[in-house]
Image (cartoon, rainbow, N blue to C red):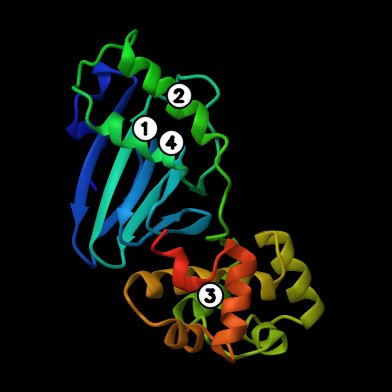
């Protein structure tokens, strides 16, 4: 991903750009002086921060506050619109999040990336920018984030699940892997991730499912690949999480 220093960002408080990345592209850990709003037109990206992992599905957006270290990985070919925003603008969100994008917000993002570098801040372009920043704060979050623990023993467990979301081991097995008693493991895991192991693993499975679906894998194969006992069980969980069946979600 191109750095903000590659662009004359000092010209205006909000600047937008379009980029295409090949499958397998990895942008190592870095940060920007500006906040970053990225909208995936197509393809799936994985964003990793120092504390969490996020999946960005097609037709959704991610917000990264200014200065947040992150790494980006393309699971397949990606076309993305990125808007860099001056952190001195008031009322900007301070937390990373992935969110749904309304037709209005999508249109506003597309307008911004087409602006000339020295656009009129007091004219039409400036009004579009202000409306975009207001509207994104009303967009609902989607459950595609897994918070990572700081404890090295828990990290060992989480990495194993990330490597294979279908791993069938139960909580006693995971506690053994962490060299902890069940009660200690359960308490510390929830304390450090904000959720129980079962919920955390479900998040990881949903994140992996989105990547596979966007790559063209069938719903049936995705269900088994991420550890569900049947396609119907996977579809029911997916529908509860995203409000639509998996066959409809990636196509928006």
x, y percentage for residue 12? 29, 18
Secondary structure of the residue carrying numbered label 4: helix
Q: CA distance from mark 4 to mark 3?
A: 30 Å
The residue at which mark 2 appears reads as: 131
Image position of 6 (left or right of 82): left
Task: Kindly indicate whether the residue at mark 4 contacts the one at mark 2 (C-beta within 8 angstroms).
Answer: no
Up-down relation of residue 128 to residue 82 (above or below): above
- Upstream in sequence: badge 3 or badge 1: 1
- Upstream in sequence: badge 2 or badge 1: 1
Q: CA distance from mark 3 to mark 1?
A: 32 Å
Up-down relation of residue 186 to residue 21 (above or below): below
Q: CA distance from mark 4 to mark 1?
A: 6 Å
Report the disc number at residue 104. Answer: 4
**Residue at (18, 34) in percent of width and height:** 6
The residue at which mark 1 appears reads as: 108
Q: Report the front residue among 239 and 6.
A: 239
Q: Residue furthest top?
A: 122
């Amino acid at each position: 991903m191109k750095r903000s220093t590659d662009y004359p960002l000092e010209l205006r408080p909000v600047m937008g750009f379009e980029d295409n990345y090949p499958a397998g592209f990895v942008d190592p850990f870095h940060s920007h002086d500006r906040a970053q709003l990225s909208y995936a037109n197509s393809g799936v990206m994985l964003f990793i921060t120092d504390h969490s992992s996020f999946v960005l599905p097609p037709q959704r957006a991610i917000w990264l506050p200014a200065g947040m270290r992150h790494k980006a990985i393309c699971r397949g070919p990606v076309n993305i619109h990125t808007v860099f925003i001056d952190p001195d603008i008031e009322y900007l969100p301070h937390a990373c999040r992935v969110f749904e994008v309304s037709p209005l917000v999508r249109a506003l993002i597309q307008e911004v990336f087409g602006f000339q570098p020295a656009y009129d801040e007091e004219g039409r372009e400036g009004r579009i920018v202000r409306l975009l920043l207001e509207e994104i704060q009303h967009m609902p979050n989607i459950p595609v984030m897994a918070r990572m623990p700081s404890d090295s023993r828990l990290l060992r467990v989480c990495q194993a699940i990330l490597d294979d979301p279908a791993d069938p081991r139960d909580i006693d097995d995971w506690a053994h892997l962490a060299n902890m008693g069940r009660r200690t493991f359960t308490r510390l895991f929830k304390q450090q991730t904000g959720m129980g192991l079962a919920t955390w693993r479900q998040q990881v499975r949903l994140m992996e499912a989105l990547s596979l679906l966007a790559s063209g894998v069938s719903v049936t194969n995705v269900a088994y690949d991420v550890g569900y006992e049947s396609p119907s069980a996977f579809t029911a969980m997916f529908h509860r999480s995203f409000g639509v069946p998996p066959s409809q979600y990636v196509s928006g």
